[in-house]
Amino acid sequence: REPISLEVPVGSEEDSELGDFIPDTEVESPINATAHKLLSEQIKTVLNTLPAREQKVLRMRFGLDDGYSHTLEEVGYVFQVTRERIRQIEAKALRRLRHPSRSKKLKDYID
């Protein structure tokens, strides 16, 4: 086969090029970007219903603020408690999030 230029005009008016129809896999689609933003906002809303300490533990453990998931030990160091205590706080916070009054806000995002 002979190579074809991506700048070859396409269509009867020739105002489009072949390269215009090749998807850019490096860019997130607008639909996915919007869904991700809405999910982030809902997570923030639901987390704000928890006590401040539980919010902070979950944010650190799941990397919701800085994109880095912190270990139990790292979170414990910040709160000056043992990693076991952080595990307990995390478990309690997750139990609270499973309550229907909170979880119903996130159900639409589960596949």
Image (tube, grey):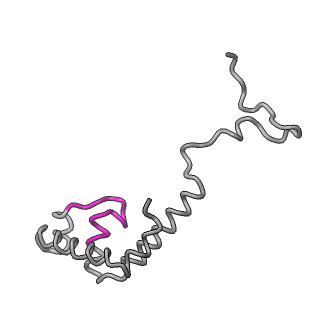
Q: Which residue is drawn at 31% across and 81% down?
A: 50
> Of residues 12 and 17, which is closer to you in this image?
12
Image spot of residue 7 (x, y percent): 75, 32
Toward the top, the furthest residue is 1
Q: Residue at x 54, y 45 (%)?
A: 26
Q: In this view, does 27 lie above or below 84?
A: above
Image spot of residue 95 (x, y percent): 26, 75
Q: Quadrant of residue 8?
A: top right
As drawn, is 15 to the left or to the right of 68?
Answer: right
User: Would you say residue 76 sits in the magenta stretch?
Assistant: no
Q: Is the magenta stretch mostly helix, strand or loop?
A: loop
Q: Residue at x 56, y 63 (%)?
A: 34
Q: In which quarter of the image is residue 101?
A: bottom left
Image quadrant containing the N terminus? top right
Image spot of residue 72 (x, y percent): 18, 64
Image spot of residue 69 (x, y percent): 29, 60
Numbered-mark total? 0
User: Would you say residue 63 sits in the magenta stretch?
Assistant: yes
Q: Residue at x 71, y 24 (%)?
A: 4
Q: Is residue 49 above or below residue 66?
A: below
Image quadrant containing the C terminus? bottom left
The span picked out in magenta is 57-71
As drawn, is 16 to the left or to the right of 43?
Answer: right
